[in-house]
Image (cartoon, rainbow, N blue to C red):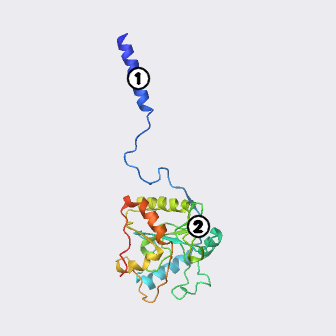
């Protein structure tokens, strides 16, 4: 009788412990659930691949068999266009649109980005993550680009809280998948990277002035991914 009672009490205690919520000793902003990404491919056929290879050769001095990259930088942007559909359509064609006279002399390869984040935080993957996209001067060969819908008229720091969360989650996702990544920068900071070995642009006259995605957004993202110890660009001289 005594043994039966003790066994019953032991089973009750074990069951109660099993039902306790597990305690989190180290809390982070890293998403617990798998990141939800919607694939929405831009046109990246043989012509675009060939133009990318030529871009790599003429601007970076490298002759390559394919356009795969080893990602070392996550680079954040805004579109300066508030419509997702219009922003997507600008990146979709293989050849540069006629209104991009500011960069047309450098190449007719259309601009692109690996990801686009809608105002509601929905994440779209536009192309393979380890293919080179044309989204930043000098650093395309080592960077993954994330476009955010917003930045009205290329001035307003108007990216949403949902976009902030999506970018934080994407940074964790990409760093986890590609341990080679060691920088997190904003497009407006790209020229500070000229002081690093990752800068490859051979044309000293090929530069543009950028303001996206703004220091406020970059500070907010960086404050939530501190545990990844990603580098910022060297301070401008």
When the figure is inspected, residue 63 is found, relative to residue 75, above or below; the finding is below
When the figure is inspected, residue 42 is found, relative to residue 104, above or below; the finding is above
Q: Please state, as top left, top right, bottom left or bottom right, where the C terminus lies in the image.
A: bottom left
Tell me the element at label 2: loop
Query: Where in the figure is residue 204, as x and y percent of width and height?
Result: 42, 88
Q: Residue at x 47, y 75 (%)?
A: 187
- Viewer-proximal residue among 168 and 106: 168
Q: Residue 197: x percent and y percent? A: 34, 77
Q: Judge from the rendering whether residue 80 lies leftward or rightward of residue 19; answer left or right.
A: right
The residue located at (65%, 69%) in the rendering is 85
In the picture of the structure, the residue carrying the numbered disc 2 is: 41
- Residue drawn at (41%, 86%) of the image: 202
Q: As drawn, which residue projects farthest toward the top?
A: 1
Which comes before the other along the chain, label 2 or label 1?
A: 1
Report whether 197 appears left or right of 174: left
Quarter the N terminus occupies:
top left
**Real-space CA distance between mark 2 and mark 1, rounded to the nearest whole angstrom:** 55 Å
Secondary structure under tag 1 reads helix
Query: Residue 3: horizontal and vertical position, in percent?
Result: 35, 13
Closest to the camera, between mark 2 and mark 1, is 1
Q: Position of residue 199 (x, y in %)?
A: 39, 79
* Nearest the eye: 105 or 150: 150
Residue 108, quarter of picture: bottom right
> Disc 1 marks which residue?
11
Q: Which mark is residue 100?
A: none
Image vertical order of residue 160 relative to residue 48, above or below: above
Q: Are marks 2 and 1 in contact (CB under 8 Å)?
A: no
- Could one spot residue 147 in this view of the protein? yes
Badge 2 density bin: few <14, some 14–19, many ≥20, Cα 10 Å: some
Residue 64 in view (yes/no): no
* Label 1 environment density (alpha carbons within 10 Å; few <14, some 14–19, many ≥20): few
């Amino acid at each position: 009788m005594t043994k039966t009672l003790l066994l019953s009490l032991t089973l009750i205690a074990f069951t109660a412990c099993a039902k306790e919520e597990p305690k989190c000793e180290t809390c982070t902003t890293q998403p617990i659930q798998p990141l939800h990404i919607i694939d929405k491919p831009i046109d990246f056929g043989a012509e675009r691949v060939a133009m990318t290879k030529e871009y790599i050769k003429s601007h970076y001095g490298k002759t390559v068999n394919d356009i795969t990259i080893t990602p070392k930088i996550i680079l954040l942007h805004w579109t300066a266009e508030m419509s997702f559909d219009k922003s997507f359509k600008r990146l979709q064609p293989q050849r540069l649109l006629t209104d991009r006279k500011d960069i047309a002399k450098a190449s007719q390869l259309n601009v692109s980005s690996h990801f686009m984040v809608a105002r509601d935080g929905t994440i779209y993957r536009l192309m393979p993550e380890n293919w080179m996209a044309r989204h930043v001067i000098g650093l395309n060969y080592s960077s993954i680009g994330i476009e955010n819908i917003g930045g009205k008229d290329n001035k307003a720091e108007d990216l949403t809280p949902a976009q902030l969360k999506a970018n934080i989650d994407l940074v964790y996702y990409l760093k986890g998948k590609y341990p080679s990544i060691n920088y997190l920068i904003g497009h407006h900071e790209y020229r500070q990277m000229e002081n690093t070995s990752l800068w490859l642009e051979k044309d000293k006259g090929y530069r543009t002035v950028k303001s996206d995605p703004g220091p406020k957004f970059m500070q907010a993202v960086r404050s939530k991914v501190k545990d990844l110890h990603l580098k910022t660009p060297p301070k401008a001289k």
